[in-house]
């Protein structure tokens, strides 16, 4: 199949990911691997570049709205970057089969998180919450450890650390959800960029895959924001659950 198909596939991944607030990486990586036959490490590398691009494009909106906690973001940036660098270095030693099974575990985690949120809907959020927060020494230790884990997962699987960072900030540090998403977007751009450079050094960034994937994700993410207002969230989540279960089965059988 021609690599030209990567562009429309990436548009769909970006749109669907932005409508669910998950980012397109968790959809793009299995799509490239299962539909296009791209080796999973090259798919992860392309996804990291796309994640970095969408983060840089989206963080401006959160900054203008005052939804980025700069102090929290700077404090978590170093452990997140260290985790991302460790993950990027490990990818050269981890077999592709192991990366595939790690992705399966991540998908199951995301599905569990989504099913839980469907049964326990979050209360309405303030339009302009106070994003300044305080944390105690115990919370600081947990936050630093989980941030490093989020960075490593981002580098290994190309999905952006927001899947770890947002629940961390919202549930453990008690940051308002909108502020957690904004601060996470700020962190993702830095960590994904650092990880992508490591993949470049290892020769896993293929321009014919990276360019259409990145352009498609950015375009799709912008369109997904508009489509999200027209399509019921429950329908989107049910479709996502079905697609991800199919992905888990295909990955496991492969």
Image: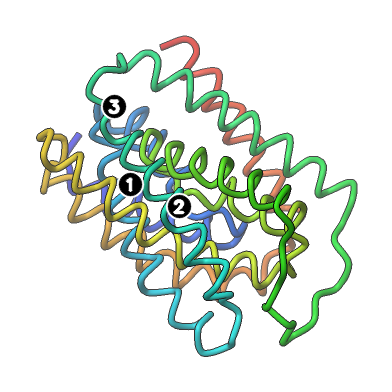
What's the CA distance linking mark 2 and mark 1?
8 Å
Is 161 situated left or right of 203 in this image? right
Query: How far across and down, in percent of the image, does residue 31 sit?
Result: 39, 37
Q: Tell me whether the residue at label 2 lies in contact with that at label 1, contact meaning CB atoms closer than 8 angstroms.
A: yes
- Identity of the residue drawn at 40% across and 12% down: 254
* Circle 2: element type: loop
Tell whether label 3 touches label 1 (CB within 8 Å).
no
138 vs 228, nearest the viewer = 138
Q: Which secondary structure lies at badge 1?
A: helix
Of the two numbered discs 3 and 2 in the rendering, the one whose residue sits closer to the viewer: 3
Distance in Å between CA atoms under marks 1 and 3: 14 Å
Tell me the quarter of the picture where residue 105 sits.
top right
State whether residue 243 is above or below residue 20: above
Sort mark 2 into few (<14), some (14-19) or many (20+) by Cα contacts within 10 Å.
many
**Element under label 3?**
loop
Q: How is the protein colored in the picture?
A: rainbow
Of mark 3 and mark 2, the one earlier in the sequence is 2
- Residue behind mark 2: 24
10 Å crowding of disc 1: few (<14), some (14-19), many (20+): many
Foreground: 94 or 250? 94
Picture disc at residue 9: none
Disc with the residue nearer the chain's start (2 vs 1): 2
Q: Who's the residue at 31% across and 60% down the image?
A: 216
Determine which residue is flagged by label 1. 47
- Residue 152 lies, in percent from the top left, at 42, 37
Q: In x, y percent, where is residue 236?
A: 67, 53
| Label 3 with label 2: CB-CB less than 8 Å | no
The residue under the point 56% across, 31% down is 106
How busy is the neighbourhood of tag 3: few (under 14 within 10 Å), some, or many (20 plus)?
some
């Amino acid at each position: 199949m021609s690599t030209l198909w990567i562009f429309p596939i990436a548009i769909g991944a970006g749109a669907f990911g932005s409508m669910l607030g998950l980012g397109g990486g968790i959809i793009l990586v299995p799509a490239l691997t299962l539909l296009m036959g791209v080796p999973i490490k090259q798919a992860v590398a392309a996804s990291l570049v796309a994640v970095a691009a969408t983060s840089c494009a989206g963080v401006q909106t959160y900054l203008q709205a005052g939804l980025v906690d700069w102090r929290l973001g700077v404090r978590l940036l170093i452990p997140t970057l260290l985790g991302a660098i460790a993950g990027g270095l490990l990818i050269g030693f981890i077999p592709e089969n192991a990366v595939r099974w790690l992705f399966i575990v991540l998908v199951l985690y995301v599905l569990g998180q989504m099913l839980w949120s469907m049964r326990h809907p979050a209360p309405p959020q303030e339009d302009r919450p106070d994003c300044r927060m305080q944390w105690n020494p115990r919370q600081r230790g947990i936050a630093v450890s989980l941030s490093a884990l989020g960075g490593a997962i981002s580098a290994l699987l190309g999905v952006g650390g927001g899947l770890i960072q947002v629940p961390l900030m919202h549930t453990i540090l008690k940051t308002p959800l909108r502020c957690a998403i904004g601060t996470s977007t700020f962190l993702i751009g830095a960590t994904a960029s650092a990880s992508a450079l490591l993949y470049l050094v290892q020769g896993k960034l293929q321009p014919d895959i990276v360019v259409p994937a990145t352009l498609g994700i950015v375009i799709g993410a912008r369109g997904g924001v508009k489509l999200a207002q027209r399509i019921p969230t429950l329908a989107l989540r049910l479709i996502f659950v079905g697609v991800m279960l199919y992905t888990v089965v295909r990955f496991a059988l492969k």
